Amino acid sequence: MFISYGVYHAYMNEPDEPYSTTVRISSDVLEEIRQFKRVTESIGDTIARITREWQILRTIRQIEHWDRDDIRDLRNAIKRLDMLDPDKQWSARVDWANLPSEFIPDTICGYPVWAMDRHGLCLVGDAMDGIEHINEILEWYKNKKR
């Protein structure tokens, strides 16, 4: 079996001048090349999977150990986890009811507040994608009771 390759050869005056050469490769060697390609593709897939899982675990750790300084950091980590884990296999490992948070007043019940940062900003909404200040939420409850 003959395989022809276009090869670029660097000449002193003409660095991109192509030339063609013919290489004789036996069918056994060709099969070994194909097998090597399959193995390297498999290794590449494994590396991609491991890298994705590492990113997911790192993001889960960021969520679970959020420093309560800026609620946007928590929201961004949750969005990143949703993007990395769309089928929610890994997200189930997070205890969503016990996210790190400043104290949330007991008077707020039934309102989807997931966490609050040191500045009073709260992560709210069923999708955990809204941000409201605790004073706005307390005002809403105050007006609701009237």
Image (tube, grey):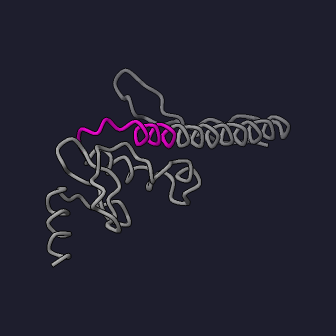
Q: Is residue 79 above or below residue 4?
A: below
142 on left or right of 108: left
Please state, as top left, top right, bottom left or bottom right, where the N terminus lies in the image.
top right
Of residues 92 and 136, the one nearer the viewer is 136
Question: Which residue is pictured at 40% across the width and 36% down the height?
Answer: 65
Q: Main secondary structure of the magenta part?
A: helix
* Position in image of residue 83 (x %, y %): 44, 55
Residue at 52 percent of width and 36 percent of height: 19
Residue 89, quarter of the rendered image = bottom right
Q: Position of residue 24 (x, y in %)?
A: 76, 35
Left or right: 89, with 8 as reference point: right
Please state the extent of the stretch shown in magenta in the rendering.
Answer: 55-70
Q: Quadrant of the C terminus?
A: bottom left
Vertical side of 136 occupied by 6: above or below: above
Q: Residue at x 37, y 42 (%)?
A: 100
Picture coordinates of residue 120 (x, y %)?
18, 49
Residue at the image position 79 percent from the left and 36 percent from the top: 32
Q: Within the magenta stretch, is there residue 23?
A: no
In the visual, does 107 lie left or right of 40? left
Q: Is residue 62 magenta?
A: yes
